[in-house]
Amino acid sequence: MKRTAAVSVFLALAMMLCLSIAAADEANFLGEPFPDFSVTDTEGNFFTLSEQLKDHEAVLINFWATWCKPCRTEFSYLREVWEKYGDRVAFIALSPYATDTLEKVTAYREANGISFPMGLDAGGELYKKTGSGYYPTTVIVDRFGHAVFFLPGTFFNPAEIERVLECFTGEDYTESAVLKEVPADRTTRVYPVSAKRSVVPENENVKTIIIHVEDVEEPYTCYVVPEEKAHLRLEIASTDHPETMGFVDSLGSTLLVSDTLDSERNAYVYDQSTEGPQGDVYYHFNAGMLTSLELGTKDPDRIRFLLIRDEAYMDEVIETLRQAGYSGDISWEYADSAQTDSNPTETDQTYTINVMDQDHQPVPGVCVNFCTESACAMVESDENGVIFFDGAPDVYHVQIIVVPEGYSFDEDFELYTDRTGGAWVLYIRKD
């Protein structure tokens, strides 16, 4: 997807989400027999849906295009899952894009080390059947030949793909059942959170610039980072869902914030280039956004920002905004010290755990122990699912003791805190 300006990713993302919702709503083919098809893959082998279903429990069809960067990211996840499920589930990646040829797909497959079959959806007939307008798109056909799952957009990690495939494999799957969304992770897990959402460059000598664009209410924040990479600390609030919070770069590639967790630091960290190519144009700046990825919602708290090596390139940033269609007055200024506080979320040596179920709903009545080598203190979550502990600064070993009826947890779960306190979201299962 060629961009005319790096900052256009924010508009592109919003449109992508809206149109993905429309595609999902129009998935009238789910529950119906999927058209049988036969294609020749890059190895010269015939891949026929009906034949594959004779010795596989399901078929995963991924629609993609050679220019699609999110597709490339997702292929690494698909490859990992195919290596685990390939004897039970057949995979095929088909490009319906008009200018993609079998030669281009073959070169792409070899360059990216993709092991499962790839080919073309000539004329895009199968892709049109889904009603999706975006790449990638995934459809799963079950052992009975029915389309039972449809995802316009990317899977965010291999575990999501596995949770979907588990719904259609095994002896218990005896009749077609449509799955309309990726099943929630039901394992007990914990993620660090902060008092508020923020993006903090941890490089030395960082300056913050605020860009004001006429008729645009939300200003752009620009970090001047005099290095090739910006070392970013991503902070999310306790009201955010870690597994639907995403970091979006200037090319539209999306990374789940939970996948950036550095467990030793108890922080989300990500290195992003401060400049680079956008299509066939090279920019001396880069863009990013920290936002919720939940479909059907507009995130008013999203954080969008630019990275630049030197403020000498601000003229290039302003010209790019002009090319993106902003015709009004554009100005910039250095932010004051109150806006550039790099530690806005100090916890004052308290320990807070927000207990949620897999649907991000608070769970009261959960008891946990905060233990040192010499003593333990048991604390219960309140009516808002919040556990607050203000013990002396120490490294506490936290274990779940009791959960309310109707909930369960993994008994081997444990958490070690920092001496300086902190806040976390703890997920347990609503059965």
Image (spheres, helix red, strand yellow):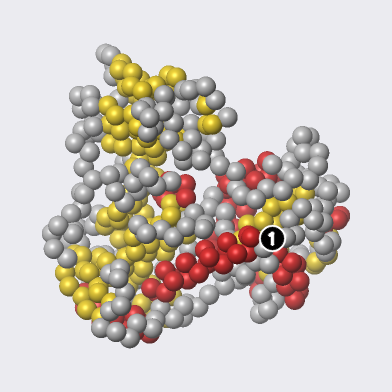
Give the residue at x 20% y 65%: 208
The one nearer the camera, 307 or 236, is 236
Q: Would you place residue 375 above or below residue 100 in this image? A: above
Secondary structure of the residue carrying numbered label 1? loop
Give the residue at x 65% y 46%: 164
Q: Is residue 342 left or right of residue 425?
A: left
Where on the picture, by quarter, is residue 347?
Answer: top left
The residue to which callout 1 is attached is 27
Single out the residue that lies furthest toward the left: 337
Question: Considering the image in quadrants, where does the C terminus appear?
Answer: top right
Give the residue at x 26% y 57%: 201
> Mark 1: which amino acid?
Ala
The one nearer the camera, 269 or 349, is 349
Residue 191 on image: x %, y %: 39, 39
Residue 256 on image: x %, y %: 46, 52
The one nearer the camera, 167 or 103, is 167
Q: Would you place residue 137 above or below residue 55 in this image? A: below
Q: Would you place residue 160 above or below residue 301 in this image? A: above
